[in-house]
Image (cartoon, helix red, strand yellow):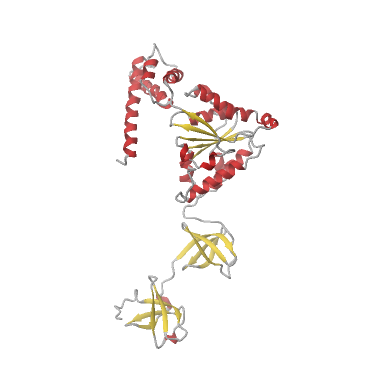
Amino acid sequence: MIWEYDEALNLGRVKLVSDDGECVHVEFLNGNTAVFLSRDSADFSPGDVVLIAENTLESASEEKWPREKAWIGVVKLLISNEVVVEIGSGLHIMPVPEDLALRVGNTVEGTGQDNIVRVISDRPIRYIDQPDVDASTIASFKENRNAEHSFEDFAGSVNIVIRAKELIETPLKFHEELKQIGARPIKGVLFTGEPGTGKTLLARIIASRADATFYQISGPQIMNKWLGQSEELIRKIFEDAARQEKAIVFFDEIDSLATQRSDESHEASRRIVGQLLAAMDGFNRDDNVIVIATTNRPQDIDIALRRPGRFDWEIHFPLPNVGDREAILIRTQPPGVVGGLSHAVVAEQTEGWSPAELSAIWSEAALLAVADTRNNIHNEDYIGGFEQVAKQRVRKLMERKMQERGES
């Protein structure tokens, strides 16, 4: 074997010397290993630094060997004489060092593959350090109790309001009476329907009318901002809700948070689903808490969440029919309207529109009115507002279809 001498490449450390003293196992800086025959192998011991020149080993100074790159990890589990350490996004098993007293949660420094050198901190320190989940964090998910909402603010079907009162408002207001009867408490109600049909607004209205503490949790917010602490956050929100006289825990877009668990699903999602199941099953009969969740993709929610005692009640928010659309337009029109307006005509032209899109007509009409230096809305503003929203709606539908086809 002919070696091209390069100290950086030819620097190694002895890992093993054979029993007969003739073979030396050497590990190089890049992690590769080689075995050398050496008449002088008895002069080498494991750990010695060596230089390989012309296929022979020469002793080298320890100073030539670069300091091993240190790693930082968090102790996750102690088992017998081994410790499980989280390094980055992976878990590693290594021996417990004899001279260190480790506890779960310690942040440790180590070198090599399994050498823990010291304890840096008693608490876990991570690359992306999340804030503690404390009382102020929980408070950030609560809506102001002074916010007043009325069923008149809801621009959807009257039948939806009636059903929501039955399933949510009545159990919250008459919790003790229902408990005395022995009725099975309603824990979870799923709101299904297209975006803009008023699901979130109705949940807020019910909480306001029932004088209940309202916690609003966004699926994407939990997965992005609180990744790594999602389970703790959910657990503490439920604990805080259970201490209230009445409470609604509201999950917006729960399909992004609690998807079907499978071998391919993300570990974080599986943990969140498990925490949700534990939290809902942890309610007792004294807890006056109802969980509401919204989705426009109920088929994507983990099936375990739809079983009895969880989200086993459902209210569907359909797109309004022509009669509902006319009623929504009349109910949501602002005070500054003059003359007879073409509600029936607009209602006929808005098939498939959501209540949110119908309400947006008035915002556009008001802009047209003030642009014409008027403080009231005329019929031409109303029709112009309808045309503006219709254009925006067509553009959004085209963008959605392009995204579904994978186009830019």
153 sits to left or right of 64: right
369 sits to left or right of 287: left
Give the vertical position of 95 relative to 348 (above or below).
below
Q: Residue furthest bottom?
A: 39
User: Residue 250, image x and y in percent?
Assistant: 53, 36
On-image quarter of the N terminus: bottom left
Residue 58 shows in this picture = no
Instruction: Residue 210: name its quadrant.
Output: top right
On-image quarter of the C terminus: top left
User: Residue 289, image x and y in percent?
Assistant: 61, 35
Which residue is at a point 54% across and 66% down the rendered structure image? 118
- As rendered, which of 215 and 276 lies closer to the eye? 276
Which residue is at a point 55% across and 26% down the rendered structure image? 163
User: Residue 120, image x and y in percent?
Assistant: 53, 62
Give the vertical position of 114 relative to 151 (above or below).
below
Give the vertical position of 302 relative to 122 (above or below).
above
Give the vertical position of 185 relative to 272 (above or below).
above
Marks counted in the figure total 0
Q: Residue furthest right?
A: 180
Residue 43 shows in this picture = yes
User: Residue 324, image x and y in percent?
Assistant: 45, 20
Instruction: Residue 185: name its quadrant.
Output: top right
